[in-house]
């Protein structure tokens, strides 16, 4: 095969993965090929990353040892139909599409050829080298295939291997998860402005607080509820905020929102 790694879809997540593997020396730019209908995205991959590009998805499926399917779930069926005739039977296919099962991809590529498929769920903090990725092997993917996927993603993320039945949960918790935190920080900034801070001051205070809290979560042996209790003095300011959230069903709403994300992930695969 002419290339070690190929991207079908060159969006933001594909860019994060590409920057990670090239920056870590996993692959050289000359070993990577990317396809996308957007000339702007192809220009970025070519000019900023030094990656050869094409507008032909089938060329990637035919010429690359590992093919990353980085397209939206709604586009997956059409893309798989397009590349099926050219798909190299020796290639490993890795999908990052929410809700799309490995079995769906296997059948679309022709199950009689036993295509090797791994389904992964990354998240956008890969763009800053702090991502979280879950990986699940399809029917014919091997331990070596999982190791290859881990090598690709661990350049910009922690990688967890699990059963594919849990991927909708992963999508809801970590795939969509960054948006929940961004949404919370949005409200913290809005509250700060209402209290007299400038927008810049409120953003710096909220953003740095979120960063510090995340570092405490990942570095401390304490559970999240223990860390929360250590900040929450009885009768103090934090207690006033937590009590208000609890009385207005914020914990229940949050859990229900994440369950809704998991439900939508499952729906995308139907």
Image (spheres, grey):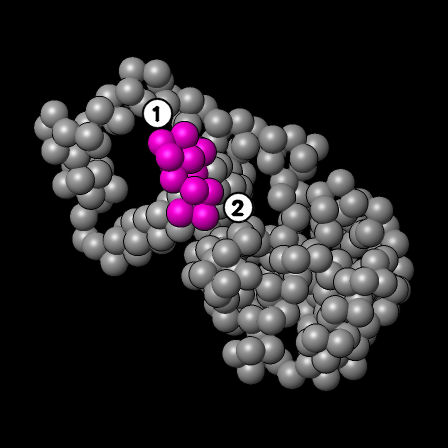
Image position of 260 with respect to 111: above or below: above
Q: Is residue 66 visible?
A: yes
Looking at the rendered image, the quarter that the N terminus falls into is bottom right
Image position of 1 with respect to 57: above or below: below
Query: Which region of the structure is painted magenta?
Result: 187-201
Which quadrant of the structure image shows residue 148?
bottom right
Looking at the rendered image, the quarter that the C terminus falls into is top right
Considering the numbered disc 1 on the image, is that residue within a helix, a strand or a loop? Answer: helix
Residue at 36% across / 52% down in the picture? 208
Q: Where residue 251 is drawn, which disc sits there? A: 1
Residues 233 and 83: in front is 233
Considering the numbered disc 2 on the image, is that residue within a helix, a strand or a loop? Answer: helix
Q: In this view, does 1 lie to the left or right of 191?
A: right
Distance in Å between CA atoms under marks 2 and 1? 20 Å
Residue at 78% across / 81% down in the picture? 2
Q: Is residue 63 left or right of residue 171?
A: right
Residue 10, image x, y percentages: 73, 61
Residue at 45% across / 48% down in the picture? 200
Residue 209, image x, y percentages: 32, 48
Q: Mark 2 points at which residue?
A: 175
* Residue at the far top in the pictured view: 247
Residue 211, image x, y percentages: 36, 53
Residue 21, image x, y percentages: 58, 74
Residues 165 and 202: in front is 202
Residues 91 and 196: in front is 196
Which quadrant of the structure image shows residue 32?
bottom right
Few, some or many residues within 10 Å of mark 2 (<14, 14–19, 20+): many
Is residue 5 magenta-colored?
Answer: no
Which quadrant of the structure image shows residue 64?
bottom right
Q: From the image, state whether disc 2 or disc 1 is nearer to you.
A: 1
Is residue 190 magenta-colored?
Answer: yes
């Amino acid at each position: 095969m002419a290339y070690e790694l190929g991207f079908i879809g060159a969006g933001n997540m594909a860019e994060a993965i590409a920057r990670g593997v090239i920056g870590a020396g996993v692959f050289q730019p000359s070993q990577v090929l990317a396809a996308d209908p957007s000339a702007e995205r192809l220009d970025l991959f070519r000019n900023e990353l030094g990656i050869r590009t094409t507008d032909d998805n089938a060329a990637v499926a035919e010429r690359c040892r590992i093919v990353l399917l980085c397209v939206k779930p709604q586009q997956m069926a059409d893309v798989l139909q397009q590349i099926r005739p050219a798909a190299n039977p020796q290639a490993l296919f890795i999908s990052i599409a929410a809700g799309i099962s490995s079995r769906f991809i296997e059948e679309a590529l022709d199950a009689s050829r036993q295509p090797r498929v791994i389904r992964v769920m990354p998240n956008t903090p890969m763009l800053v080298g702090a991502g979280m990725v879950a990986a699940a092997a399809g029917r014919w993917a091997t331990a070596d295939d999982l190791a290859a996927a881990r090598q690709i993603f661990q350049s910009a993320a922690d990688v967890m291997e699990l059963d594919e039945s849990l991927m909708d949960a992963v999508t809801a918790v970590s795939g969509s998860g960054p948006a929940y935190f961004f949404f919370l920080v949005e409200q913290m900034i809005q509250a700060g402005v209402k209290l007299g801070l400038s927008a810049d001051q409120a953003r710096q205070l909220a953003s740095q607080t979120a960063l510090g809290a995340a570092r405490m979560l990942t570095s401390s042996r304490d559970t999240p509820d223990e860390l929360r209790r250590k900040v929450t003095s009885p009768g103090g300011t934090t207690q006033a905020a937590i009590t208000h959230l609890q009385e207005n069903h914020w914990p229940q709403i949050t859990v229900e929102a994440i369950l809704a994300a998991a439900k939508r992930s499952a729906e995308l695969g139907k």
